[in-house]
Amino acid sequence: MPTYDYVCRACGHQAEVTQKMSDDPLRRCPKCRKSRYERLIGGGAAVLFKGSGFYGTDYRSESWKQDAAKDVPAPPCGGNPAKCDKPDCSSKN
């Protein structure tokens, strides 16, 4: 549910109120009880995607994923951890 900002034009009381979009705007101030309560126009919220994003990786074709896997360099031991003497070998993980 969206959150709306309200201000009373009589007493200056401000509040954030969570309401359904289908609800009527509030008219009576909860502090002074006068009918000068107004819903303010807000800037809204936005979704900001940074980096390569999910689309760049989730919706790739299988052929693209296979080609990308070929571009990964092979470990120096050829993928056999028993032959590798390096403590940081990626094939041991």
Image: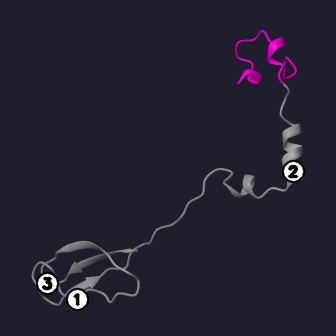
Q: Which residue is mark 2?
A: 64
Specify the quadrant that holds the N terminus. Answer: bottom left
Residue 19, disc: none
Q: Is residue 60 left or right of residue 1?
A: right
Residue farthest toward the front in the current orientation of the protein? 82
Residue type, numbered disc 1: Arg
Badge 1 vs badge 3, beta-carbon distance below 8 Å: no
Q: Secondary structure at mark 2?
A: helix
For the point 42% across and 72% down, which residue is it? 43
Residue farthest toward the top in the current orientation of the protein? 85
Q: Is residue 91 above or below residue 18?
A: above
For the point 34% across and 79% down, which residue is it? 19
Predominant SS of the magenta segment: loop
Badge 2 vs badge 3, beta-carbon distance below 8 Å: no
Residue type, numbered disc 2: Trp
Q: Quadrant of residue 25?
A: bottom left
User: Does 89 lie within the magenta span?
Assistant: yes
Sequence order check, earlier mark of 1 and 3: 3
Q: Which residue is mark 3?
A: 10
For the point 80% across and 56% down, which residue is it? 60
Q: Relative to the observer, which residue lies in front, 18 or 15? A: 18
Q: Secondary structure at mark 1?
A: loop
Residue farthest toward the left in the current orientation of the protein? 32
Give the residues drawn in magenta, as a range. Answer: 75-93
Q: Relative to the observer, which residue lies in front, 56 or 77? A: 77
Q: Which residue is mark 1?
A: 27
